Amino acid sequence: MDWSEVVELIRRSISRSLNVEKDKIVLIEPTREEYGDISIHLYKLSRDIGIRQDRAREIITSSAERLDIVDKVEEEKYFINLHLNRELVSKHIITEILVRRDKYGHSDIGKGELVIVEHTSTNPNAPIHIGNLRNSCIGDAFSRILKALGFRVRRHFYVDDCGLQMSITGVGYDLLKKMRVHPHEEFDVWLGSIYAIVNLFVEISDIKKNLYQYLQEIPKNKYEITEEEYRYIKSRLRDEDPELKSLLRELSECYSIQEDLKNRFPEVYKGILRALENISDLKQTVEKWNYAYETKSDTHVVSTIREIVDKCMKDILDTLKMYDIEFDSLDYESDLVWSGLVEKVIKDLGRTPYLSRQNGALVLKLSEFNKSIEIPDLVLVRSDGTTIYTTRDIAYTIWKFECIGAKRVYNVIGTEQNLPQRQIKLALKILGKPYAENLVHLGYELVHLKNFKMSSRRARYITAREVYREAIGRVLERLARSRRTYSEHEKQRIAKAVGVGAIKFALLKTSRLKPILFELDRALNLEENSGPFIQYSYARATGILRKAESVDINPYFVDYSKLTTDEEWRLIKLMSKFPSTVINSYRDLRPSLIAEYLLSLAKMFTTFYEKVPVLSVADEGTRKARLALVEAYRVVVSNGLHMLGIKAPEVM
RNA sequence: GGGCCCGUAGCGCAGCUAGGAUAGCGCGGCGGCCUUCUAAGCCGCAGGUCCCGGGUUCGAAUCCCGGCGGGCCCGCCA
């Protein structure tokens, strides 16, 4: 029995006695302990069902009193307060937990339905950073929640290897290879620097080209901004022509990026700059690569991009593995394009009245399809024949439903992509796909850092690996200050579990619709509203059972009348709410609900731990009952942590 | 200009979807608690115009309308 069943039992009984539908009976949580466990607002109820208050009171009271789980019915102001029979309810709840064990909180509402959770899906041209990690944690936790609820879950990583950002990286990588400049750091970090630097040169040459019509002093086909040029630009910044002014400002911003990248990645920077002497139009080269890759028409381009994508993906997946995050499938965007599926989707859309050609590009007229909401049209195919990201994502979505057979698809993608996600859904509707409604955008707000703006285009980020190393280091430091002694192996295991737990919890506990200000000190402060706090409570609970002479707890042979303290009762009640918390978390797409729940549960356990002795209590029956309670706590908290992808260490 | 989201204690956040009793938690501040199951802990104190203004209601942090403040999006980028 869990809390929702207790509530249901009472509702059913009262609704029968009053002869009204169950939905009309609203049971609420009392705000104070002396008001009992469950309350009914008499005024509201009597109005809702059209019956006099005193009559309702009479019926409810006698109906509730007949239930064996109800101990006492009291009246206070306009409330009827029910006090539950602690012994009986405790018995039901603890038995349920100890019998169901690692299945407590699980259910079969998913009925084995196949669902896809797509998450992380970062560009394979840079390391995964702390911002991406929020996505991974939410996606991974949500997958675990779905699994616990009986869904068949597949976790997919969309490898975005088409698109300009890959051509930019590929061109730079190729140039360096020809110059015999080889990577000597972590590959993904190295690749990220190439992307940022080539991207910068594309940008600079573009601006210079436009600037040339105003200022011939700035040569139009040079990639670097010299110091002289920069001084000159600054002296002209106050020019009155707005167009010129904005170009100057952009270029001056590029200069600061240039200096930063030159400083941090001198070898890559100089190598690419030297190689560029032989390239007259970098942007054109990039576009050529983009076209060649998407059409698979140049083996050198294809093998080069594939090479860097695979190497980068290895680093990304290795990093995520450190956080215990894994995938069932890597879906290469290029495979999707090369298979002809993207083309087919465009063709299918062409048969609807909503596709039209504008200036050589193919545009999906979403505004005409749905006039009730305002939504911008979507360019599907550029005038050079290449597709854009959203187009490929439409095909990808169809692939998930039709080729994989998913009944529902969850996309963990930042809220900044709200619009494209809606556009995809509309495109599915235009195609008459019945599953359009089963595409769920699990959006989340970004991670911000204090005094630091992350940017892939500038190769500025806090990588997930850095954070991991820092977290491990801090836990080891904490262990060194501990009064306990640990073996080396134990230290490493705890450091990993707790370090990762701290980071994951910090990223999961906040509602996904709120931006997170990530401060390392705060996230890794092991003494807060934190993952380690919950883990610590588990370790303490485990400690008690380790020291108990008999760990064999049979819930059927426990005298529940011995659990008499308020601390015990509060803990039992809260544990009984775990299953409904999991359901709510799934229904509202909010893993943070479980995080929040575990925090209050751990807090409650800690209070119990401080106030109620277990091992030292003289009465054997009491000791046994409390041991059962502690064991039940371990079950609930470890199930909950597991759903968040956080380990529960036995020792800390 | 339009769309989505957020606004609760000095700071970080729950509570709002299904309106009810004295609005919670953590950090930070102050004061206590380790010969007794792990002090990564516990207990106490101080700290609030629930952004503002209307409306609905016996009753609003919660629902509705209108403002204000902040974020994101509205690209032949991803």
Image (tube, coloured by chain):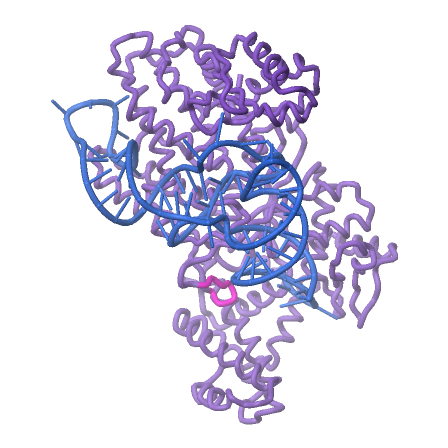
Chain colours: A purple, B blue
Q: Position of residue A474 (x, y in %)?
A: 30, 46
Q: Residue at x 60, y 19 (%)?
A: A8
Is A579 left, or right, of B64 in this rendering?
A: left
Residue A152: image quadrant is top right
Q: Is residue A333 visible?
A: no
Give, as a single range, the part of the protein colored magenta: A453-459
Front position in the image: A218 or A171:
A218
Number of callouts in the render? 0
Q: Position of residue A617 (x, y in %)?
A: 26, 13
Image: A54 above or below A461: above
Residue A555: image quadrant is top left
Q: Residue at x 47, y 10 (%)?
A: A88
Front position in the image: A38 or A299:
A38
Front position in the image: A40 or B78:
A40
Q: Residue at x 50, y 71 (%)?
A: A197
Q: Residue at x 44, y 43 (%)?
A: A504
Q: Is residue A258 visible?
A: yes
Front position in the image: A596 or A87:
A87
Residue A408: image quadrant is top right
Q: Position of residue A604 (x, y in %)?
A: 38, 28
Q: Position of residue A165 (x, y in %)?
A: 59, 64
* Picture quarter with the C terminus of chain A: top left
Judge whether residue A531 is colored magenta: no
Image: A535 above or below A542: below
